[in-house]
């Protein structure tokens, strides 16, 4: 297991490690081994009360509400900082074998709570950045013990939407399981999953965390996906990336079935091309048309329309506009509404009719509303494209 480590003062960072160890022990876990207090990130191996062995690699920082000049009075934050080099990007270690779960988290031992961000959203990360949230988010964490929310964009609409998850100390084991189940999810489904975990891990997530799957649990998972049990298993077995983004694949599978049932559609197949289109089809003898499936965010806009963060995770070096999509990259965009409606429903749009990015006019804007430019009539819009 090779990852970059940083020397830290044991007296400064030790309380963060103590918080996690005490929280796990409080949930009935047995600590097998942990890294020293003067070495970051922290590495912990432990056994749960059911005998399951888990490992975590934790990039942990202090969360606080210290009043800072020119910052809002109601703001909390955790500063991402190891060492003294603020010039380079620092890669977070993500276990390719899925044995260790990476956490990127702010902890307040004084208040007995933590707030975690999606590690993939911060990989690589720059020192020194801050992850901010508000007093009312902390109040919800204290009230409910567990809370998930969209991070305030601070007026920068170009920033990717990010979902934070917070909990009290007794929920830390639950948080480990959450991040294990949420690895690779889009932010809309990350928030949906966080809401489902308010009263503890749902049955499907317990199964994903490695527990045996009882017949009733399998039935619940199949019912959630609106697919027969055997189709769920076949889908998981056939997709090499499915364990990292199961809901994304389920969305694509439902989309393929939906489009394949449209009169005039032929050769409708799901593609497995990293960074490419999700679906290819022909309509009434047309050329092969490409379809990109994107999940919407959990929270609606103020006017009630669904929202989509339509951009790539990161830009190519030296070209910030490469983060955004060209209108000609795909023939059709399909918005999966599951994160909002909790049903596998879709709306469609030709990307060329969407608003352009203000700073990159050759690209489609990232802050997309699923408004009246979108349609549920797949046949009609395919007819327009195929002309």
Image: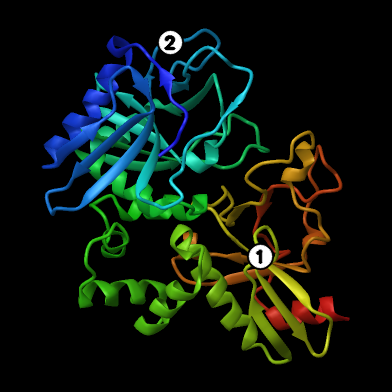
Q: Residue 327 in the image: x percent, y percent?
A: 81, 57
**In the foreground, 8 or 134:** 8
- Identify the residue under disc 1: 273
Residue 8 figure quarter: top left
Left or right? Give the position of 274 relative to 233. right
The answer to whether any part of residue 228 appears in the image is: no
> Is residue 60 shown above or below 334?
above
- Seen from this angle, which residue lies furthest right? 387
Coloured how? rainbow
- The answer to which of marks 1 and 2 sits earlier in the sequence is 2
Q: How many marks?
A: 2
Q: Split into 4 quadrants, where in the image is the C terminus? A: bottom right
From the viewer's side, name the closer residue of 256 and 304.
Answer: 256
Residue 22 at what x, y percent from top left? 16, 30
Q: Residue furthest front?
A: 1
**Image: 243 above or below 34:** below
Residue appearing at x 73%, y 64% in the figure: 373
Classify 10 Å Cα crowding around label 1: few (below 14), some (14-19), many (20 and above).
Answer: few
User: What kind of element bears circle 2?
Assistant: loop
Residue 146 lies, with reference to residue 72, above or below; the image says below
Left or right: residue 221 versus residue 313 is left
Quadrant position of residue 206: bottom left
Residue 208 location, x and y as percent? Answer: 32, 61
Residue 296 sits above or below residue 73 on the image: below
Residue 85 placement, left or right of 138? right
**Residue displayed at 69% across by 47% down:** 366
Q: Which circle, 1 or 2, is nearer the viewer?
A: 1
Mark 1 → mark 2, Cα distance in angstroms: 47 Å
Name the image quarter holding the N terminus.
Answer: top left
Q: Position of residue 266 (x, y in %)?
A: 71, 89
Residue behind mark 2: 67
């Amino acid at each position: 297991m090779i990852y970059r480590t940083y020397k830290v003062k044991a007296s400064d960072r030790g309380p963060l490690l103590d918080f996690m160890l005490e929280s796990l022990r409080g949930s009935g876990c047995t600590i097998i081994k942990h890294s020293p207090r003067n070495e970051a990130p922290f590495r912990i191996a432990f056994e749960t009360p059911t005998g399951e062995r888990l490992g975590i690699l934790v990039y942990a920082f202090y969360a606080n509400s210290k009043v800072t000049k020119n910052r809002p009075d109601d703001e909390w934050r955790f500063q991402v900082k190891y060492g003294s080099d603020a010039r380079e990007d620092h890669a977070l270690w993500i276990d390719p074998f899925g044995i260790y779960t990476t956490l990127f988290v702010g902890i307040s031992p004084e208040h007995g709570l933590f707030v975690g961000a999606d590690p993939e959203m911060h990989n690589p990360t720059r020192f020194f950045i801050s992850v901010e949230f508000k007093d009312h988010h902390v109040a919800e964490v204290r009230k409910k013990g567990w809370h998930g929310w969209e991070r305030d964009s601070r007026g920068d609409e170009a920033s990717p939407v990010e979902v934070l998850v917070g909990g009290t100390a007794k929920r830390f084991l639950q948080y480990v399981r959450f991040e294990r189940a949420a690895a690779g999810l889009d932010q809309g489904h990350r928030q949906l999953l966080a809401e489902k975990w308010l009263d503890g891990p749902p049955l499907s997530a317990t199964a994903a965390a490695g527990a045996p799957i009882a017949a009733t649990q399998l039935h619940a998972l199949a019912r959630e996906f609106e697919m027969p049990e055997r189709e769920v298993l076949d889908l998981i077995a056939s997709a090499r990336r499915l364990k990292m983004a199961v809901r994304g694949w389920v969305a694509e599978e439902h989309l393929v079935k939906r489009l394949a049932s449209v009169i005039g559609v032929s050769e409708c197949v799901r593609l497995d091309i990293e960074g490419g289109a999700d679906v290819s089809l022909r309509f009434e003898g047309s050329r092969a048309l490409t379809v990109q499936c994107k999940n919407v965010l959990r929270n609606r806009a103020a006017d009630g329309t669904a929202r989509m963060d339509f951009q790539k995770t990161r830009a190519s070096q030296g070209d910030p506009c490469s983060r955004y999509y060209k209108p000609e990259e795909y023939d059709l965009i399909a918005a999966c509404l599951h994160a909002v409606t909790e049903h596998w429903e879709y709306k469609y749009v030709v990307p060329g009719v969407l608003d352009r990015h203000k700073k990159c006019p050759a690209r489609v804007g990232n802050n997309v509303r699923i408004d009246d430019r979108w349609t549920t009539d797949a046949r009609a819009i395919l007819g327009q494209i195929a002309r």
